[in-house]
Image (cartoon, helix red, strand yellow):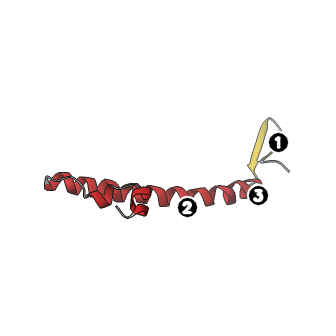
Amino acid sequence: MGLVDVRDDGRRRLYRVNAAPLRAVHDWVVGYERLWNERFDLVDDVLDELTRAVSEGSAPSESSTATEEEQGRGD
C-alpha cells in the first residue's frame, strides 16, 4: 500500500491518503525537531543578551562571549 490510494468511481477519481507510510518519516524528523529547537533556544538566549547589552550601552561580558575552548583553558 502506497502513500495515496486512487479509486475510480465512474467519471471521478477518488484519492485517499494513507498516513501509515508517513509514520516512519515523522518519527525520524521528531529527533531533529528537538535538536533544532534546543539550538534555536540557545541562539535566542545569545540574542537577548546582546540586545540587553546594546540597550545598556555596554558590550557583552568577556565570559559570556568566550568560546568553549577559551572557557576550558581557564583564561
Name the residue carrying label 2.
34
Mark 1: amino acid: Asp
The x, y position of residue 71, in whole percent, is 39, 61
Q: Is 68 positioned to the left or the right of 65 in the image?
A: right
Q: Nearer the viewer, residue 71 or 28?
A: 71
Mark 2: amino acid: Arg
Residue for point 72% across, 58% down: 23
Name the residue carrying label 3.
20
Of the image marks 3 and 2, the number of the one nearer the N terminus: 3
Q: Is 49 positioned to the left or the right of 28 in the image?
A: left
Query: Quick one: label 3, few (<14), some, or many (20+) residues within 10 Å?
Result: few
Name the residue carrying label 1.
9
Marks 1 and 3: which is nearer the front? 3
Query: Quick one: label 1, few (<14), some, or many (20+) residues within 10 Å?
Result: few
Mark 3: amino acid: Ala
The x, y position of residue 12, in whole percent, is 77, 38
SS for dot 2: helix
Of the image marks 1 and 3, the number of the one nearer the N terminus: 1
SS for dot 3: helix
Q: Are marks 3 and 2 in contact (CB under 8 Å)?
A: no
The x, y position of residue 49, in whole percent, is 28, 58
